[in-house]
């Protein structure tokens, strides 16, 4: 006989706990300027995706408050009924201009933007090639589409090429799904090579720019825009091979929600077929107004982006010089210090917190087994002096661990 429901819940929790993988949550009070308070203690926050500190930026906060006063708190209905307010239209216009596309789909989260658009645009008889480290929302979208799915090892272009070649005899539509910046690694997808493969094997790319929006490109339009600006990809090629780009409002823009950038026709199809959009209430008013104001900030102060990337590059170099295993693209504000072992990662995070630094300890299943890491997330609010102090704290832990082993 099968277990009772409650016994099953207990057993499953016990198994997670035994593997040292039990997650809990705490109340974290954001204070701005890179700080937060937990259980009465103030900490330096190196754990959020709020790379520019926009979630507590006074101009962005005021824009959200003003919009709430004008239009209310919630969108009150699906956008197809009456949940599309002037705040939604303004955000959509701002993003359309920012992304230089035909139209924009607004979603209540980046997760839904990825999952819902892939499910809707990829047909059952298509074939998807998906990087193994892609975010859960991309993988869920691929699964929901019911298309045939080939998972390739992270950034393994040789395998991908071989699999694409094998599929050449099949009369199917081919898709390559990838993040442009891998959120747990800070690495860039090999987009130029992926585009070459897409051209050679007649495939389309679906790109999730969640960690790239606000961080790459001259005004934060993402990695694809940066490659275009550098002359590495042409606008025609991008249009031909990347029919949709997906972004989030919840990270560098400091708000909440997600979006899909595409042609007007594709967006119209998505509004008509993507189930989480059709059957869910529109994005909240505050989220729309805050994101619109955040885009304005990036356009007015693009130096924020270069300064964030310069600090990230310096920080990464110092850590590497100190002998740490640090992954990621040189300028990415996602700085994973790989400690491999789950227990050590947890204990370092605890020790650093005791010293005043809040840093995410990332374990499986978020990352592959044996690659546990501290995911240091840099923000424009972190000063050079603060970063130096964090490096000193990390070095001390390194010495302590070496002495023990
Ligand atoms: N894509 C990637 C690569 C992500 O890292 C995340 C969030 N962790 C999402 C999509 C989902 O975005 P949101 O938090 O806005 O739902």
Image: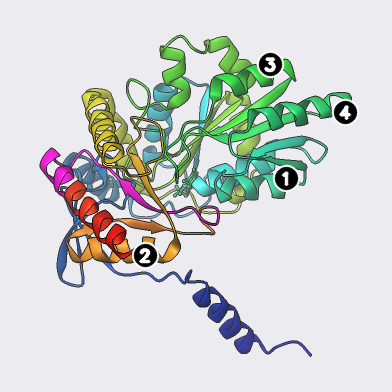
In the picture, the disc for residue 199 is: 3
User: At x 33% / y 66%, what residue is drawn?
Assistant: 347
Q: Position of residue 377 (x, y in %)?
A: 31, 46
Question: In front: mark 3 or mark 2?
Answer: 2
Question: In front: mark 1 or mark 4?
Answer: 4
Of the two numbered discs 1 and 4 on the same chain, state the one appearing first in sequence: 1
Where are the magenta residues, as a range?
368-389
Q: Nearer the viewer, residue 18 or 285?
A: 18
Q: Position of residue 215 (x, y in %)?
A: 34, 31
**Separation of disc 1 and disc 3 at Cα?**
23 Å
Residue on which the image places disc 4: 170
In the rendered image, which quarter is residue 16 located in? Answer: bottom right
**Separation of disc 2 and disc 1 at Cα?**
37 Å
User: At x 59% / y 17%, what residue is drawn?
Assistant: 239
| Farthest left residue in view | 385
Residue 378 belongs to magenta span: yes
Q: Is residue 101 left or right of residue 379?
A: right
Of the two numbered discs 4 and 2 on the same chain, state the one appearing first in sequence: 4
Q: Nearer the viewer, residue 161 or 86?
A: 161
């Amino acid at each position: 006989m099968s277990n009772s429901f409650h016994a099953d819940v207990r057993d499953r929790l016990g198994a997670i706990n035994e593997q040292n993988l039990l997650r809990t949550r705490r109340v974290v009070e954001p204070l701005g300027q890179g700080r937060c308070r937990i259980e009465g203690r103030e900490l330096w926050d190196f754990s959020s995706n709020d790379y520019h500190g926009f979630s507590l930026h006074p101009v962005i906060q005021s824009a959200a408050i003003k919009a709430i006063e004008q239009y209310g708190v919630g969108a009150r209905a699906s956008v197809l009924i009456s949940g599309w307010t002037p705040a939604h239209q303004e955000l959509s216009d701002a993003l359309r201009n920012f992304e230089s596309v035909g139209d924009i789909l607004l979603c209540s989260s980046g997760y839904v933007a990825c999952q819902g658009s892939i499910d809707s645009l990829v047909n059952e008889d298509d074939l998807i090639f998906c990087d193994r480290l892609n975010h859960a929302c991309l993988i869920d979208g691929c699964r929901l589409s019911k298309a045939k799915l080939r998972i390739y090892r992270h950034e393994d272009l040789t395998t991908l090429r071989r699999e694409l070649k094998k599929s050449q005899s099949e009369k199917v539509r081919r898709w390559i799904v990838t993040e442009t910046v891998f959120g747990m690694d800070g690495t860039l997808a090999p987009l130029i090579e992926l585009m070459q493969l897409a051209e050679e094997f007649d495939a389309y790319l679906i790109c999730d720019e969640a960690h790239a929006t606000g961080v790459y490109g001259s005004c934060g339009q993402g990695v694809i825009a940066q490659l275009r600006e550098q002359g590495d990809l042409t606008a025609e090629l991008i249009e031909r091979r990347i029919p949709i780009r997906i972004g989030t409002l919840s990270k560098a823009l400091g708000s909440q929600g997600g979006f899909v950038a595409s042609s007007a026709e594709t967006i119209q199809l998505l509004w008509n077929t993507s189930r989480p959009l059709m059957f869910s209430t529109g994005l909240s008013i505050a989220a729309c107004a805050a994101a619109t104001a955040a885009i304005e900030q990036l356009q007015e102060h693009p130096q924020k982006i270069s300064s964030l990337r310069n600090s990230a590059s310096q920080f990464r170099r110092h850590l590497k010089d100190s002998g740490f295993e640090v992954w990621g693209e040189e300028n990415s504000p996602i700085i994973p210090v790989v400690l491999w072992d789950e227990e050590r990662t947890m204990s370092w995070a605890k020790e650093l917190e005791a010293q005043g630094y809040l840093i995410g300890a990332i374990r499986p299943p978020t990352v592959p087994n044996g690659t546990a890491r501290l995911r240091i997330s840099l923000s424009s609010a972190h000063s050079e002096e603060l970063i130096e102090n964090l490096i000193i704290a990390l070095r001390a832990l390194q010495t302590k661990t070496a002495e023990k082993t």
